[in-house]
Amino acid sequence: MELRTLRAFVEVVRQGGFSQAAKTVFLTQSAISKAVKQLEDELGIVLLDRAGHRSTLTAAGEIVYRRAIRMLAEQEDLLGELSELRGLKKGRLKLGLPPIGSDALFAPLFAVYRSRYPGIEIQLLEHGSKRLEELVRSGEVDLGASLLPVSSEFEWQDVRREPMDVLLPAGHALAAREEIELSALEDEGFILFDSGFALNPLVLDSCRSAGFAPSIVARSSQINFIVELVASGLGVGFLPRFIAQKRVHAGVRHVAVTKPRMTWHMAWIWRSGAFLPHAARAWLELAASRETQLVGRE
């Protein structure tokens, strides 16, 4: 049973005949007659009592007419709801965010996105980059903010690149320098983030390139706690420069690291070849349009 034949039948009933129905739906009278006959043949029962120029419903026709009205209404509701979704009047955006840098990078985006698309429900999950990759892979989030590089199973859109700074106790012998080589920190205790944070491999791989394996004295998932541990003299920490600059502490200095330079590269990722909901596409478009503005204000 096709909706087009139901629509033709309904219009014949509403208009009281085939000729008027044909004018209403901009079809020929023969096309309308054929559609109604097709419906009757499919159902195996007469729906209209054709008497002269008027057509009246049979008992079976009344049943089909009531049902057809509901089915056509459901179709209109479906199309309307999809139209609203495409217009971003309704929907859901599932985002995965890392604890590091999200406040500075994405808080302004949330405000703008919410003002443009107030009907979109935003669901947030916060994890380290590796866990976020798993959530994107499983479809539990539409987009995840992760450090590059990522595997080819993901597509990505650039968010920001930042050099890494080392956090040193204010009284440290190297704290007054503008930059230091990573090898100069070989004998220091390293304060890293918890496992699952992609920042850790960045630091550890750079240490290997510099020819040493660091001594890890503590781990934490909280930036402020790591800053406090550095201030206490426990060891040294690492943060992207723009984040380090926002964590001002009288007992901590941040210094640029060279040889090798470490680059923190954040991007939005999603499954390669996967369908992205309209809400997620709108987020990426907004993020891309505001990227240079956000960078310029830092």
Image (spheres, rainbow, N blue to C red):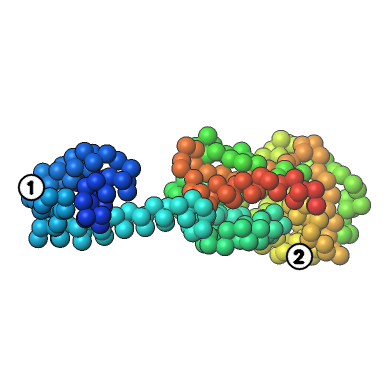
Q: CA distance from mark 2 to mark 1?
A: 81 Å
Q: Which mark is residue 249?
A: none
Q: Which mark is residue 44?
A: 1
Q: Locate residue 116, reporting x and y percent.
A: 61, 58
Ranked by sequence position, the earlier of labels 2 and 1 is: 1
Q: In the displayed structure, would residue 222 be above or below residue 49?
A: below
10 Å crowding of disc 1: few (<14), some (14-19), many (20+): few
Give the percent coordinates (x, y) of residue 189: 74, 53
Mark 2, residues whose alpha carbon is within 10 Å: few (<14), some, or many (≥20)? Answer: some
Q: Residue at x 49, y 45 (%)?
A: 276
Task: Note whether 226 is above or below 297 in the view shown.
Answer: below
Spot occupied by residue 143 in the image (x, y as percentages of width and height): 54, 49
Helix, strand or loop at label 2? It is helix
Secondary structure of the residue carrying numbered label 1? loop
Q: Residue at x 24, y 46 (%)?
A: 19
Residue at image mark 2: 228
